[in-house]
Amino acid sequence: MPPQRVPPGGPTGALPDAPAPGSGGNHPDEGARGRLRPLNRILVNVLLDGALAAVAAPIARWLADPQGGLIHPLWFLAGGAITLLVGGVPFRMPQQYWRFSGVADLLGIAGASVASAVLFAALLLATGYRLPSITFPIIHALTLLVLLGSLRIVYRLSQGRPLGGSAAATQRVLLVGADEAADLFIRAVRRERGTPLRVVGLLARGRHQPGRRIHGVPILGTLRDAAAVLDRLDRQDRRPDGLVVTDPELRGADLAAVIRAAERLGVPVGRVPDPTALSPASRVELRPVAIEDLLNRPQVALDRAAMARLVGGRRVLVTGAGGTIGAELARQVAALSPELLVLLDHGEFALWQVDLELAELAPGVSRRSVVADIRDRPRLRTVFTEHRPEIVFHAAALKHVPIVEANPSEGMLTNILGTREVADAARDAGTAEMVLISTDKAVNPSSLMGASKRAAEMYCQSLDIAARRGGREGGGLRCVTVRFGNVLGSTGSVVPLFRRQLERGGPLTVTHPDMQRYFMTVSEAVGLVLQASAVGAASASGQTEALLRDGGIFVLDMGEPVKIVDLARQMIRLAGLRPEQDVPIRFTGLRPGEKLFEELFHGHEPPVPTGHPGLLMATPRTDDARGLGQALDAIGSACRAGRPDEALALLKRLVPEFAHNPDGAVPPVPASNRAAVAEKDPIP
């Protein structure tokens, strides 16, 4: 019976512990052998360079004086070798890694060749040997440069992929991007022996690049020519097997257009990883194009210093810390070095997950995990009294529109009364600032979820107005409200749903062909929330402070809305499939509370610039804290008594713009201010 193969580290497959320093590993001679390997390589380099230098000396002598012949005494050859070894020491020639030779190595060879030629000429003169010509040192240096450089170039080329090979096993790819990333990709493909990829052309962003070449690969056209280039290659029976996006800045509409052009011929599209990503250097790996890459959103410069001043060294509490927004808030807050980070959530498993992640990402940050319901007043008061948070990020809410419609009392108790309990507990505990995470569904709400968030906005507005004007109701608590749209990939959002449906082979379900939403990545949304929090806490004068004193709330600049059906088609294309042919799209009709278009601003609250990129401000209607408190008491009593219809009627009186759509009928297109936003650039 043949012996069984034992995995590394024994039968369990675990890797063995690292040997103690000086132990030499498992075998007493293993460490010595490991130290000898680099010395052996250096010795080989020295011998090869010395041999080439010995040959270069008589060749240079013959080139300078052809009458002298190529036969020379051994001391002449030895002198050529020794002077190169001495002259190459300052340029670290023995340590060069020939497989990765580049321009820096060639410059080192040039320097060593010049130094060696000068030393050799000086040696000849010192021994009374007459130089064959005054140009001999120059010829000698050039000869050394050619011989030494050629050997390294030949070796490096020999380590690359063989020029032959099976054509059937080779995948032809067209690179999208003609820049440094394309240069690195082509180098990596040619260096790796086992890769099946062969680059047949490039598409450039610049209009003046077509017709040129990168490492011999032609630039066939620009991004706008993608469809024409692919058609031409198809007619020539050279259609690529895939498109590879190498340009890290290619996103949004331009990337979507390239994907559509490739889809016509059934050509898949991939993207190279970030050049700075840590991955094996000898492996060429592609990754799918992320749906986030199709959002045409430029990177917003955030004021990290202001955010660090807001959070650094302070006690911070995050409600809903187990959710998508709350967890990302916890991550970004932890990176700003708070004194204490309190994670509060009603779900034990979600809370455990984010706490475990933070233990790995920010082990030096002091954390507390608190299981609590934001509707539980005594429990909240205990938590706030114990931890005394200086900043509260309130992300806990019921956000799924159909579920809130089906459970109206729970939705109102959580989103309205729960927010009030958090705000009151923060005010009484001496918290300096509370940040309410709101939604675009609070604008002209057609759903109970949106109306409940609008009522929560109004209560926080009233506390903030009182605090900024010195009223007793605010108690010094500044309440900053931040409103934004959908977050890509968040729990319950459309993107994870589409991914699950794609995994099952479809169909993808869309409620209405005209439905559109604003989208933003979770990291970008939370970064701007922190930016708004810093602005709201620091404002002491100017237009922004004046608007805040009147109940202004921050609105994130969400860019242009995206049609959900277009998002579905793009996700099908990114999976390498064809919409309607490989994967059908089915329209299911609007759900209760949904509307076709979401709005970021009410018709009477036009956007106002804040002077900070990505942040706008709205000034919706407000009410006094005392009157709101009485209305919320009545809503809470009706919900707890099992009278949701009465609570709903009270909410409609509180939010008169609430146009309830419980049956999911197609509502009229709202009189939004999208045209006004398009006419005026909201970012100064």
Image (cartoon, rainbow, N blue to C red):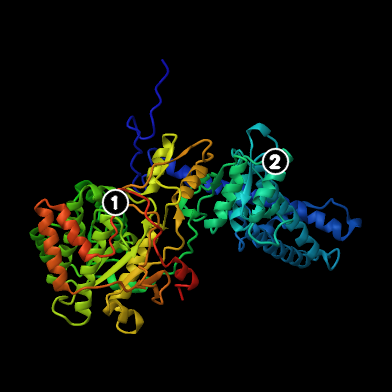
Neighbor class of circle 2 (other Cα within 10 Å; few <14, some 14-19, many 20+) is few
According to the picture, the residue beneath numbered tag 1 turns out to be: 401
Please tell me whether mark 2 sits on a helix, a strand or a loop. Answer: helix
According to the picture, the residue beneath numbered tag 2 turns out to be: 234
Task: State the residue at coordinates (20%, 64%).
Answer: 653
Please tell me whether mark 1 sits on a helix, a strand or a loop. Answer: helix
220, 660: nearer the viewer: 660
Residue 194 sits in which quadrant? top right
1 or 2: mark nearer the eye: 1
Q: Tell me: 69 left or right of 672.
A: right
Task: State the residue at coordinates (49%, 37%).
Answer: 583
Q: Position of residue 390 (x, y in %)?
A: 20, 70
> At label 2, which amino acid type do we have?
Asp
Q: Position of residue 359 (x, y in %)?
A: 26, 54
Can the viewer see residue 48 in this picture? no
7, 253: nearer the viewer: 253
Q: Tell me: 364 left or right of 130.
A: left
